[in-house]
Each structure stands twice: as C-alpha cells, then as structure tokens.
Image: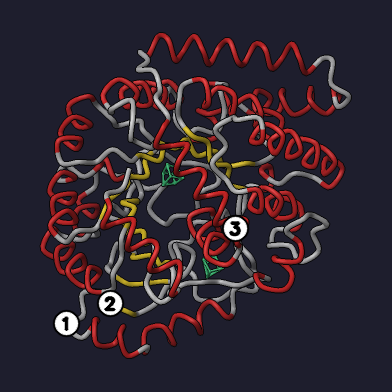
Amino acid sequence: MFNFSTKLKFLRAAITKKNPIYAQIAIESHCNLRCRMCGQANSNSNYNNSYRASSNLSLEQIDRIAFNLQKTGLPLIVLTGGEPFLRSDLDEIIKIFNKHKIATRIQTNATLITKDKVEKLLALGLTEYSVSLDTLDAKKQDYINGMEGSWEKAIRGIATLSEVLPTTTNFSLINTVVSNYNLLELPTISKFVTAIGFFHSLIPVHFEIKSQQQRENIFRSSSSSNLIISATDWEIIDDIYSQLLQMKKSGHHIHNSKIFLQQSKEFLKYGKPSNSSSTSSSKFTKNKFKNKCDSPNLYFHINSRGHMTPCLDLISDISVLDPQFISKYMSGEINKKLKQLTSNCSGCIYPCYAEISYFCHSFSAFIERGFGEIKYKRYKRKSLTFDQILDMSKKYSLSSSSSSSSSSSFESSKKHNNFGHQDV
Ligand code: SF4
Ligand code: SF4
C-alpha cells in the first residue's frame, strides 16, 4: 500500500490532470521468455549475450532519470522490461527510486523470482508485484511463453510472493492477457486468483495496427493470428465478460473497472476502443473518452534508452537524461511532442494507461477505485505454499472442465479448451 505522501500526489494528479500519476520504465531490454503475444524487439533474443548489459540503462542513468521524474511530481513507477529480474542490481534500482520518493512496483513473469530476492526487495519496502499468468493449464502456458516449465516456475514465483510478502497492506496483481487461447478459462482464473488472495487484471491482447508509423520495440503482437478471437465466437466474449462483471459484483478480486471490462469486449472484437457501447458507460466513453490518450499528462513510458514515449508501443527522441529535460517538460515542449505522437494512434486499452484515464475522467470509475482501495486496505490473505497453490490450481481447473459440460456453449468450449493442446 502507498504511503500518505504518494496518495497525496495521486490525488493532486487526478484533480489537476497536470502531473503524471504513473510511469513505466524498461530497466531491462531482454526477457527469458518468448511469449507469442509479445512484440518487444529483444524478448526473443539470447538474453545471455554481451549486448544485453550494454543495451540497458546504467544505475547512474537511472539515478538521473529518477531525479528528473521526481521534479514532475510522479508518485509511482513500474519497473518493467523485458524481465526486470534479469538485473542483478534490482535492489540498487529500488534504492534509487526510494531516494527520490517515487514508489515502485515490479512487473514480472515471476519465473526468476527467489525467496532471497523477494526478501531483499521487501527490506527496501517493495511489496507491489504484477505477475503474468495466462492460464491454469501448464502445457498451454508453456506453449504461449515459448518455454517448457515456465508455468510451474511462475507458480513457484507466485508462491514465494505469497509466503514472503506481508499478508496485509500489500497489493499483488496477476495479469492475464486475454486471447483465443484462454477466453473460456477467464472466470476460472479469476476464481483461482481470488482464492489465493491476489487480485486479477485482464488485458485484451493488442495487435499491431498496420497503418501506424514510427514503431520500434512495439509490445503489440504483429503476427500470431491464432490469438485473435474469430467473429463466430464473439457471443462467447459477451457471455464470458457478463460472467466476469457478475463475479466482480459478488466480490471476486477482479481489479479492472467496470468500464474497462465493458471496453474489453469491444476491443477483443474490433481491435480498438469502442464508441458504440450500449453499456451504462457509453455516454462517458462516447462523449468524453473516445480514443483519448492522456499521455503524457497522466502517464508515460521510458524505454531502455532513457527515452520518454507515450507508451511502450511508440518511440520518440525525448531523452529523460537530457540536462534540460525539466525545463522542457515544464514549458510544455515535451507534452506537445508526445501529443503529436498520440494523435496518430487509434487507441489502446492497456490497463496501466486506460484505467488511469477512466479514473481521472469518470466519476463512477473514481468512486469504484476509491472503494477498491478501502477493500484492499482491509484485506488479509493467507500465506500459501507452492504445493497448496498447485493443488488449488488443479482444483479450479477440474471444476471448470466439469461445469463447462453443462454450459450452453459446450461445443465452443470444447474447441477452445482443446486449442492449446492441439498446438502444443
Ligand atoms: S510478454 Fe513479458 S514475459 Fe513475455 S516475452 Fe514479453 S516481456 Fe517477456
Ligand atoms: S492510446 Fe496512448 S497509450 Fe495507448 S497505444 Fe496509443 S499512444 Fe499508447
């Protein structure tokens, strides 16, 4: 949980919309996995090569960046990559952001997490993790990640977090990229995540939009058409998301806002944010939010060269290492440059960005998040071992396959549940 000063910075940014709420920084350009939905340039390369170290920001550079970001009033930075745990100096990086009074969260695939590392970072105050898990089916996850044994390693990592992190006042997320591989599994994964005491964030898979220029290190998948949910299955999207909205209402730990879940349905079908939703949020999304990007007012990304970009999809030549960075930022020069980039974008619903826009522009999303904060604060989870979490994953997988036989979409369910195995 964030301290008082961080919360104050959040509030000021939400009210004035002139300070960033959130930024990401790619502290590591490489990754040990090769996920099919990941378009990052170095995710599929050999991470042991000598190029790796030279392509990352040094501690001195990160210190300069943190110094500049502190001046922007930034409350929170998410350390991302690639895979942040590939860096052996992760503790030094946390210390740097602590020194500059910027709270940190780590986004990780959890496969390199060890008890020692988590304890070391906990001693520095790091309790916020965001972990990727796309399915409870080990074979399917290994296939998606392009690495055998990755699912089990991720579950071990999650168990380590469960055992080492405090059971109150900490907030850890499981992120699931929603695609054709796991659509039918989503309610089951949410039940599992709730049972282990984590919170669940569902991210529709994003695809490269061909007309867009100026891309490098794009995160969106540029191929992998297998990930797309075919139009014949769009009714299933509606059905699954109705279940998720109902589950959220009944107390399951679904972290996404209602607006986000509604928008996700349209995004999964059409590949861009909707302006024609028939939901209660439609007025808001249509009139005030349609394809609006709040970068860099409320969020931005810093890539592994230290360049500030609207998000991890785009590039720019704006260096946060520039000694003139602060004066350029304060004068609005940087804002203007980034706005030009975002104006050509057809939009996204990456939760890290879109949720902040909803939070800052929709009263209902603001209230929803406020109640969420109270809920998280009061929540006490159980500390669970690897064996306990493994058993729970099996239990939820089994209950899902037995209940799907009574579902009206049984034929489609069979097709989807077998999909991963056919390809493995
Ligand atoms: S999606 Fe994340 S874990 Fe997967 S290859 Fe890309 S950076 Fe690595
Ligand atoms: S809408 Fe903004 S955050 Fe989303 S992909 Fe476009 S530029 Fe990036």
Q: Is residue 349 above or below residue 197?
A: below
Q: x, y percentage for residue 169?
A: 33, 35
- Amino acid identity at mark 2: Ser
- Amino acid identity at mark 1: Pro
Relative horizontal placement of residue 12, taking residue 166 as reference (left or right): right
Decide: few, some or many residues near mark 3? Use Cα within 10 Å; few <14, some 14-19, many ≥20.
Answer: many
The disc, 2 or 3, on the residue closer to the chain's N-terminal end is 2
Decide: few, some or many residues near mark 1? Use Cα within 10 Å; few <14, some 14-19, many ≥20.
Answer: few
Q: Residue under circle 1?
A: 323
Contact between marks 2 and 3 (CB within 8 A): the answer is no
- Amino acid identity at mark 3: Ile
* Residue visible at 22% across and 24% down in the picture: 115
* Residue visible at 60% across and 48% down in the picture: 257
Q: Is mark 3 on a helix, strand or loop?
A: loop
Relative horizontal placement of residue 388, taking residue 221 as reference (left or right): left
Where's the C terminus, which quadrant? top right
Q: How many marks?
A: 3
Q: Is mark 2 on a helix, strand or loop?
A: strand
* Residue visible at 18% across and 49% down in the picture: 94
| Res. 349 mark | 3
Give the quarter of the image for residue 386: top left
* Residue visible at 47% across and 69% down in the picture: 314
Q: In this view, does 365 lie above or below 357?
A: above
Task: Find ligand 1 in the image and state its quadrant.
Answer: top left
In front of the other: 136 or 22:
22
Q: x, y percentage for residue 39?
A: 50, 54
Q: x, y percentage for residue 204?
A: 62, 48
Within 8 Å of ligand 2, the CB of disc 3?
yes
Q: How far apart are marks 1 and 2 (CA)?
A: 9 Å
In front of the other: 36 or 394:
394
| Res. 319 mark | 2
| Res. 4 mark | none
